[in-house]
Amino acid sequence: MARTADILVVGGGVIGCAIAYELAKAGLAVTLVERGTPGCEASSAGAGMLAPQAESSAPSPRLALGLASKALYADLALELRERTGLDIEYETGGNLHCFLDEGDEAVGRAACAWQREAGLKAELLSRADALGLEPDISAEIRGALFFPEDHWVNNPRLVTALAGAAAQEGVRFVTGEVAAFLRAGDRITGGQVGEDRIRAAVVVLAAGAWSGQLAATAGLRLPVGPVRGQIVCLEGIPRRHRHLLHVGDHYLVPRVNGEILIGASVEWAGFAKQVTAEYVRSALDAAIRLAPALARLPVKATWAGFRPWAPDELPVIGPWPGLEGLVVATGHFRNGILWAPITARLIRELLVDHAPSLDLTPFRPDRFAK
Ligand SMILES: Cc1cc2nc3c(=O)[nH]c(=O)nc-3n(C[C@H](O)[C@H](O)[C@H](O)COP(=O)(O)OP(=O)(O)OC[C@H]3O[C@@H](n4cnc5c(N)ncnc54)[C@H](O)[C@@H]3O)c2cc1C
C-alpha cells in the first residue's frame, strides 16, 4: 500500500519526536516511523543533562548550539506540561565539578578562565563553599568549579511528553522499520516499511546510531554510528543531591524521584548493548570516592545505550546538498537531549521559513563525502 505525507520522520527518539512535534505545530502533515516505542534507544538511556558548559572546552559551534537550545527548555517544559500533563522535571540546580586532586583543579581553573572570558557564568568554589552546596560529598575535595546555569531533565519523560504532544498535533505514528529509502534519481521520495511505501515531500533522517546504515540504502555516505554509554543507577531516597556532580570523567545526575545516575562510559564497541563489570566498578568507585555515603545505597538498575556519533563529533543537521527531499538530523552524540529543541527549531526554520537562525555550515550532511 502507498501512503503520502508532507513529511516522513524516520526514528522516534528525542530528535525525531521533537522535529515531528515542531513541524506538526507549523501545520504540516507528519508521519513518524519508529520500529520500537518512542524513546526506546539512546533517548531514554541518556542521563538528561543540559550542560553545554560542562561539555565544552572552548567557544565553538557546539557550544553556541547548546546555549541556544538550553534557552528553549524553560518554555518547552511549561508547554509540555500544559499539553500533556507530564512534568519533564526541568531542574536548574547547576553543575558542580569537584576537584579531588591537583590535576582536576588545574583543568577546572583553566575552564573557569575561558568560560568567564566568553561571558559565561562559572565560579571557583572553596572546599567549604562546595560542601555548603552539597553537604554529603567528601571533605577530602580541594574545591570545585560551579556552572550555575547547567541544568537537567528527566529524559525518558521528555520523549514521552514530546511524542504525546506530537500525537495531539496530528502526527501519525507508525510502528515499523524503514528498511530502505525510496530514491528516484536525485530525489528521495519516501521509505519502504514492510509491504508499505510511505511517500513524502521530505524525509527527515533521525534514526540515531542507525542513521548511517539507512543512508547507505540510498547510496549515501554518512559515517554516523554507535558509541556505547553505560550507566549505573542508585536508589537514593530521600533525595540527597540538588546539583549535577562531576568527578574526573564521571558524573552523577540526581533525579527528582531520588534516583542517582552515575555515568557514563564512552566506548566504540559496535552495537553490543552490554553493561560490563569493569565499567560498573569504575563508576561506583568514582561515585563513592566523591560521596562515601552512596556506598550504602541499593543499585536499582544498570543499562547501556548507543550515542549517534559522527567522526568530528558535531551533529549532522540540514538538507543533503544535491539531493531533493532528504533532510538529516542525527549525530547528536553526547548532547542529543540538550540539542533536541534547537534541532527541531532549525529543521522547522529550514522547511517552513526557509531561513535557519543559526549557520548550519559546520553541520552539513555531506561534509564526510571525501
Ligand atoms: C549513557 C548515555 C548518556 C547520555 N547522556 C546525555 C546527557 O546527559 N545529555 C544529553 O544531551 N545527551 C546525552 N546522551 C546522548 C543522547 O541520549 C543522544 O544524543 C540522543 O538520545 C540521540 O537521540 P536520537 O533521537 O538521535 O537517537 P535515538 O534515541 O537512538 O533514536 C533513534 C530511533 O530511531 C529508531 N530507528 C533506527 N533505525 C530505524 C529504522 N530503520 N526504522 C525505524 N526506526 C528506526 C530507533 O529504534 C530509535 O528509537 C547520552 C547518551 C547515552 C547513551
Image: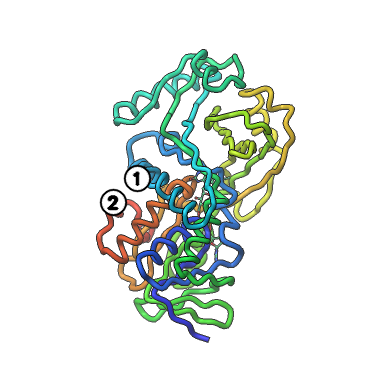
Q: Point out residue 20 in the picture as x, y percentages from the top left corner.
A: 44, 64
**Are there few (<14), some (14-19), or many (20+) residues within 10 Å of tag 2?**
few
Quadrant for residue 60, please give it: top left
**Location of residue 62 by image quarter:** top left
Residue 346 seen in this snapshot:
yes
Left or right of residue 357: residue 81: right
**Residue indicated by mark 1:** 68
Q: Position of residue 45 (x, y in %)?
A: 59, 49
Left or right: residue 65 compared with residue 2: left
Task: Give how far across and how far down residue 88 sits, in percent.
Answer: 52, 47
Q: Earlier in the sequence, mark 2 or mark 1?
A: 1
- Residue 71 lies left or right of residue 196; in this view the side is left
Q: Residue at 50% of width from left, 20% of height from top?
A: 103
Q: Residues within 10 Å of mark 1 (few under 14, many from 20)?
A: some
The kind of residue tagged 1 is Ala
Q: Amino acid at mark 2?
A: Leu
Residue 5 picture location, percent across and down: 42, 77
Q: Which residue position is annotated with label 2?
A: 358
Residue 273 vs residue 45, the one in the foreground: 45
